[in-house]
Amino acid sequence: MYFSHRRQPRLLPWSGPGGKPCYLIGDGDGPVSRLADEMEATQLGMGAALLGHARAMLDDRQVSDGELRFLVERLIEALRDLLRIAESRGAGQSVPEDPE
């Protein structure tokens, strides 16, 4: 009797050509899977650091509009990364694509 041990494809934390999602099909123990794990850990760490930076900037009353705009752009990127990681790990429904 044949049993398939194939897991669901894993959404990788980077995009392919044209911004299309990349998936890994396999057992999850290979070099691409380890690279994806490392990248996700880096993205989560950067998001946490950005959150602390955002709090400090909002407490500073002398921050310019340009600085706040830059901060919001980075927060959007970090949130997009976090949602992709959540989707990859199976947390709920598929995340809608970025309209841009």
Image: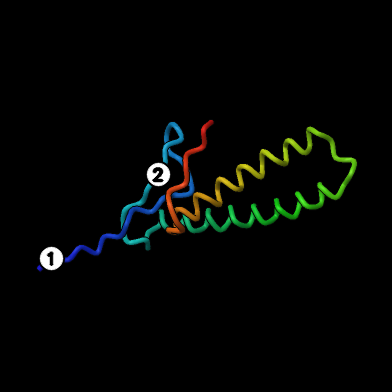
Q: Which amino acid does label 1 sit on?
A: Tyr
N-terminal of the pair, mark 2 or mark 1, is: 1
Task: Bin the neighbour count of mark 2 within 10 Å (Cα to Cα): few under 14, some 14-19, many 20 and up.
Answer: some
| 3 with respect to 55 (left or right) | left
Residue furthest to the right in view is 62
Q: What element carries label 2?
A: strand
Residue 55 x, y percent position in the rendering? 78, 52
Label of residue 22 in the image: 2
| 29 with respect to 47 (left or right) | left
- Total labels drawn: 2
Q: Which amino acid does label 2 sit on?
A: Cys
Q: What element carries label 1?
A: loop
Residue 31 x, y percent position in the rendering? 40, 57
Q: Quadrant of the N terminus?
A: bottom left
Label of residue 11 in the image: none
- The image's colour scheme reads rainbow
Residue 20, relative to residue 86: is it above or below? above
Residue 88 x, y percent position in the rendering? 44, 54
Residue 68 x, y percent position in the rendering? 77, 38
Residue at horizontal 81 percent and vertical 34 percent from the top: 65
Q: Closest to the observer: 93 or 90?
A: 93
Quarter-of-image position of residue 8: bottom left
Determine which residue is flagged by label 1.
2
Residue at horizontal 66 percent and vertical 45 percent from the top: 75
